[in-house]
Image (cartoon, rainbow, N blue to C red):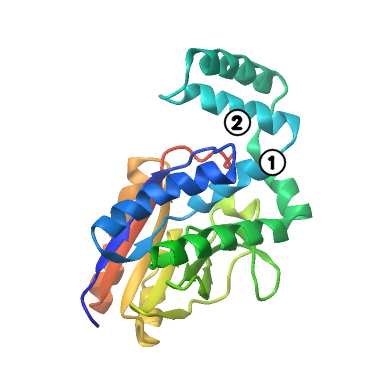
Amino acid sequence: MERYTVACVQQRLRLPLTTDELRESLRRFLRAAENKRARLLVFPELAGMMIVPPLLVDFRSSLLKRADVGRRRSATLWQKMVGTMAGSAAGVLKANYQSGLAGLLDVSSATLWESYSDLFSGLAKEFGVTIVAPSMYLPDPFDGVIRNLAAVFGPDGALLGTQAKVMLTKEDELYCQPGSTWEVIHTEVGALGLILGSDVLYPEVGRLLAFHGAEALVCMGAAGDQAAYNKLRAGALARMQDNQIFAACAFLVGRNYFSP
C-alpha cells in the first residue's frame, strides 16, 4: 500500500439555511486538505444530517433555523433579536427536527439521496480527491430501506460503494433499519473498510474486513460527550492493533439536533 496523506474531519452539527451554505462550509475543509496534499478525506458519522435543514420548509422548522442563526458568533444584532423570538415561538409550538426528519424520510427519501450524492460527488470531482462522505439516514441504493449509510466517492465523482451501520443505537432505531454485513470498498488509494459508530466496538468487524482484504479501516463516529468519544476512539485503536492495518477516525462532536 503506497503512502499518502489522509484528512479526517471533526465537525459539529450545524443547521445551514441553504444547500449552498452547507457546500461552502464543506469546501473549507476540502481546501485545508488540499493544502496538505491529502488524497483521502474522511467525514464523520451523521454529519450528513446537515443536508436535512435546507429541505425542511415548514413553519416550525423555519423557526428552529432562525433561532440557530441568532446563536451564531457571526450573528448581527438583528439576527440575534429575531433568533431569540424565533426560539421562544419554537418552544411554545414544541417544534423539533425529529418530526421533520421523520416526515422527510417517509415522503421524500429519494430527494435526500439525490441531494447527498450530488453534493459529495460534486465536491470529490471539484477537488480531485477520494471522499468518504459522512453518514446520514438514507435509502439504501440497493433495496430502498432507510439505513444509517455512508458512501465513498472517487476523484471523478463516481460512487465507489456504500456501507450501512449494523449495530444501531436507540436513536438510530427511531429512523432506520440495520445493515446486514460489512464490505470492502476499493478505491484508488487502496481497499477501505468502513466502520460506523458502535460497530467499531466489536472485534469481529475489523477481523472480517481485514480477512476480505481491507488495507485500512475508516472509523466514523458521533460523540455527544467526552466519554462516548473516548469509547469509540479506543475501539478504533483496538481494531487497528488487532489486525495490524492502518486506521483513520473522524468524529461528529457536540449536540445532535435530530436526537430526542
Q: In this view, does 19 lie to the left or right of 196?
A: right
Marks 2/1 in contact by CB < 8 Å: the verdict is: yes
Q: Can residue 176 be seen in this view?
A: no
Question: Residue 233: x, y in percent?
Answer: 30, 56
- What is the quadrant of residue 227 in the picture? top left
128, above or below 79, in the image = below
Q: Specify the quadrant that holds the N terminus.
A: bottom left
Q: Please, what is the three-letter code of the amino acid marked with disc 2?
A: Lys
> Above or below — where is 64 with respect to 155?
above
Instruction: List the residue tagged with mark 2.
Output: 65
> In what element is the residue under mark 1?
loop
Residue extending furthest toward the right: 107
Q: What element carries label 2?
A: helix
Residue at x-position 29% and y-position 68%: 247
User: Would you place residue 28 above or below residue 238 in this image?
Assistant: above
Residue 56 circle label: 1
Does 162 sit left or right of 99 as displayed? left
Give how far across and how far down residue 159 sits, in percent: 53, 73
Would you say 152 lies left or right of 113 here? Answer: left
- Specify the amino acid type for callout 1: Leu
- Image coordinates of residue 31 in percent, x first then y, are 33, 53
Kindly give the residue lying farthest to the front in the view shown.
126
* Residue 191 seen by the camera: yes
How crowded pointer 2 is (Cα within 10 Å; few <14, some 14-19, many 20+) is rated as many
